[in-house]
Image: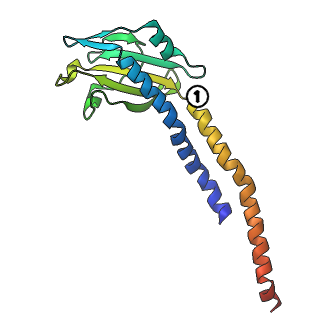
Amino acid sequence: PLLFVWPPSIPFTHYFANNVANFPYDQSLRELVGTLSRQVQLVDGKPVVSLHASTRAMLRADELDSVYFHVLTQDRKLLAGDQDLPIPALAGVAGVLPGEVYFRDMEYKGQDIRVAYSYIAEPQAPVEQWVLVEVAETTEKRTQLANRIVASVILPQFIIIPLAVMLVWFGLSRGLRPLTRL
């Protein structure tokens, strides 16, 4: 039974490894969205972005993945960042609270990306006055971490499962020897 259960366990291991790998990188994206959000001021209901060079450098500083960001009004006016980064539809605002960080996965420039986004708004402001802050990164680091997790789980199983099969066979053959003699 171990030999039959082992192959189907690999996709489950990969699924959980991806979840584990996403957590720390999602936290990092969440912090970047917070940092970028603090650079947006609402003055008389109008957004003003004061993006310092150090903040821009921090957003772009990644050795392995590409990082993209933008700050947009609801009428798609770019206030800062990458113009062509895909944005969620206005209909996607239903059930979304300003200040909360949300995540989605998508493809951009032929690469898988993970997007963290939040809306900034004054209390009681209509949806049309909300400002969208998005930070996205490619998923290379996540994939590498997930693969390392899978390898660290699956590789020991190459030793443990054959060893367990041999021990079960040895135990059963010794235990059934008196019955065989009988």
Instruction: Work out whether 105 lies above or below 167.
Output: above
Q: Is residue 55 visible?
A: yes
Residue at image position (81%, 84%) is 177
Quadrant of image for the N terminus: bottom right
Q: Where residue 112 appears, x then y in whole percent?
A: 51, 28
Q: How is the image coloured?
A: rainbow
Instruction: Work out whether 172 lies above or below 25.
Output: below
Instruction: Work out whether 126 lies above or below 161.
Output: above
97 left or right of 141 in image:
left
139 left or right of 6 in image:
left
Residue at image position (19%, 10%) is 44
Report the front residue among 41 and 142. Answer: 41
181 left or right of 66 in image:
right
Other residues around mark 1 within 10 Å, as few (<14) / some (14–19) / many (≥20) = some
Dividing the picture into quadrants, the one containing residue 17 is: top right
Quadrant of image for the C terminus: bottom right
Report the front residue among 39 and 84. Answer: 39
116 left or right of 14 in image:
left
Residue at image position (59%, 38%) is 146
Residue at image position (18%, 22%) is 125
Q: Outermost residue, right direction?
A: 181
Q: Outermost residue, bottom direction?
A: 182
Q: Is residue 86 visible?
A: no
Find disc 1 in the rendering and name its residue. Answer: 140
Report the front residue among 115 and 4. Answer: 115
Dividing the picture into quadrants, the one containing residue 52 is: top left
Q: Where residue 132 appears, x then y in whole percent?
A: 32, 20
Q: Where residue 6 appears, x then y in whole percent?
A: 64, 57
Report the front residue among 133 and 28. Answer: 28
Looking at the picture, which amino acid does disc 1 mark? Glu
